[in-house]
Amino acid sequence: MWCRLLLSLSVLFSFVHHGTAGVTSDYTRSVWPSVDIPLENEAFAVPKGSNAPQQVHITQGDYDGKAVIVSWVTPDEPGSSQVHYGLSDGNYEFKADGTVKNYTFYNYKSGYIHECLVDGLEYNTKYFYKIGDGDSARKFWFQTPPKIDPDSSYKFGIIGDLGQTFNSLSTIEHYKQSGGETVLFVGDLSYADRYQYHDVGVRWDTWGRFVEQVAAYQPWIWSAGNHEIEYFPYMGEVIPFRSYLQRYPTPYLASKSSSPLWYAIRRASAHIIVLSSYSPFVKYTPQWRWLAEEFKRVDRKKTPWLIVLMHAPIYNSNAAHFMEGESMRVAFESWFVKYKVDVVFAGHVHAYERSYRISNIHYNVSSGDPYPIPDKSAPVYITVGDGGNQEGLAGTFRDPQPDYSAFREASYGHSTLEIKNRTHALYHWNRNDDGKRVATDSFVLYNQYW
């Protein structure tokens, strides 16, 4: 395994130094229907019991991984917003109090949405938790990360543009086999905006029940995509991200952000920055000012791995969404190079692509090299917008393949990034090959700081 990965790495560096373009996979995927799973399917099953909690999910609740935010919905009445938790199944010696709310979207009225911060947790500890009332209460568990340390090993999953089709289900089932401990989600959750009127809210509910099988047991680190905007003047719904922000909280205040749409966390040996492709980010805007300060807070001696999440990729050689990330590239790429970001994960394009370490920071409209060039201080850019949604695959790549593109393929799948220590991480992209999980692209990622 190690020999194969090191060989792949040597080939990668050979391509970078000699300016040779990478691989466009000739794999042709058999067509599964890119349609949403029917409402009555067991993937969306409502839990048994009166007013039983559903759509349970957790995310990190603080800056350093010693807290979680537990969220769930009760369909008929508010019920309790408490989380009971402890160190063994059935022994819930601690409790935390949460809040409850609901919202309307056109003529849809949500269930009662609960949020509860569970903090003061110990690192590297398995906690069992219970939510709900009486016989309808439900039980789950989660594992806290290891302490913040440069050599803390940890395995992240990366999923984007998931939706709720049978292809989406394949991605979830394969991810559950990967050993991933936390999902880095790069935007476009439910694709409920593909529906109208009351059905928009219904499809947010089905998606919440769909991902509960993973999201109730390990944190999903959320970022928003274009399908979360939901700007529908014809329905009188013009507040961007309304459903998303009601349902999927983030620990933005812990990183001194002014918006839940952009924030940062530290987990194990990684510092993770989440950006919003669809919020203002040019110079002097709140997101721009926040990122300038957040980069200064990064301590590579404690968290050597610096990871950025966004939705719209800034390097993309697919015909779909080509150059849509260009304005964010102009705004932030020089910072990515200056601070030696290790890897940038994005979604949006419904295909997979990985770049070499390249940058295009010397062109200033009137002078400088106008093309991306090899840059050892630059991140690797990876597009993982292939979770399985109903819009289908983006099967047309631009020809010829640009020199900066290392590997690209139009297939559904997910990725993992397994941090080994302060210097090395193992990266894999796994293709959903007609229901089978196939490791298709992999390499050793060397840390930029160490």
Image: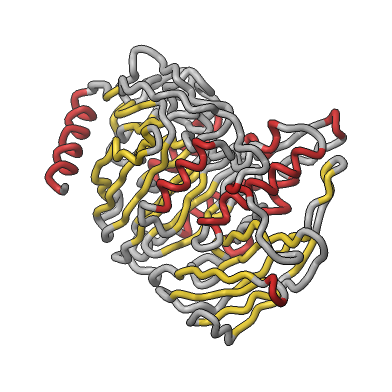
Q: How many marks?
A: 0
What colour scheme has been applied to the protein in the rendered image? secondary structure
Residue 164 on image: x %, y %: 58, 40
Looking at the image, which is closer to me, 78 or 123?
Answer: 78
The quadrant the C terminus occupies is bottom left
Q: Nearer the viewer, residue 45 or 357?
A: 45
- The quadrant holding residue 204 is top right
Q: Nearer the viewer, residue 366 or 303?
A: 303
What residue do we see at 83% from left, 45% from top? 108
Report whether 36 appears left or right of 21: right
Tell whether 299 sits left or right of 428.
right
Q: Residue 397: image x %, image y %?
A: 41, 18
Residue drawn at x 74%, y 60% is 113
Question: What residue is at 42 percent from the left and 68 percent from the top?
Answer: 145
- List the single residue furthest toward the left: 3
Q: Is there any visible trace of residue 326 in the rendered image?
A: no
